Image: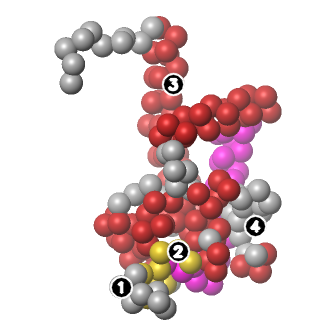
Amino acid sequence: MTSAEPRWLDDEQAEAWLALVSILEVLPAALDSQLTRDADLTFFEFLVLVQLAEAPGHRLRLSDLAAATHTSLPRLSRVVARLEADGLVAREADAQDGRTRHAALTEAGWRRLGEAAPGHIDLVQELFVAPLSRTQLKQLERIGQRLLAVLDPASEVLAQTRRATGGRPGLSRPPTPSQD
């Protein structure tokens, strides 16, 4: 820690920062509210299901799933336990290493994801897509990529989803296991 004077934000920087922080505070509650009402899922649980839907074989090692959802293993374990109790995912031992556990999307998980996705996409359209022009969306994508290059240089967060280009289950196409 240095005793040098902080590099204070100018007014334009402060306004941009406050806009982003305000979005970060308001958006998660809006997403959670809709998903809880429509599908009895939190946004985080929805992300877990989406990551499993995107994964090869619709299963991921728990450590990879934790990285993809940017959470700790203990938090992920609690969420996976709830999803498992609801029959939406199954925990499985790795065939080569019995100490390693995977989460796999079940048929019930596919159905719940299918129930949750339309309302979620409607909300994304309303809150994110409709207020912005195509040019602004492209600018926001480029801004997001620049920030993520600093915040997530290994590109672990939502890795499968961000790498996909031809339809993402529950985001740009209906989530069905037969479309792999």
Give the numbered dot on residue 60: 2
Alpha carbons under labels 3 and 1: distance apart: 44 Å
> Measured from the top left, where is residue 22 in percent x and y?
47, 30
Q: Amino acid at mark 4?
A: Pro
Task: Give the foreground label among 4 and 2.
Answer: 2
- The residue carrying mark 1 is 99
Q: Quadrant of residue 139?
A: top right
Q: Earlier in the sequence, mark 3 or mark 2?
A: 3
Q: Which residue: 59% across, 57% down? A: 159
**Helix, strand or loop at disc 3?**
helix
Disc count in the image? Answer: 4
Mark 3 = which residue? 19
In this view, the mark in front (3 or 2): 2
130 or 77, nearer to the observer = 77
Question: Mark 2: which amino acid?
Answer: Leu
Q: Amino acid at mark 1?
A: Arg
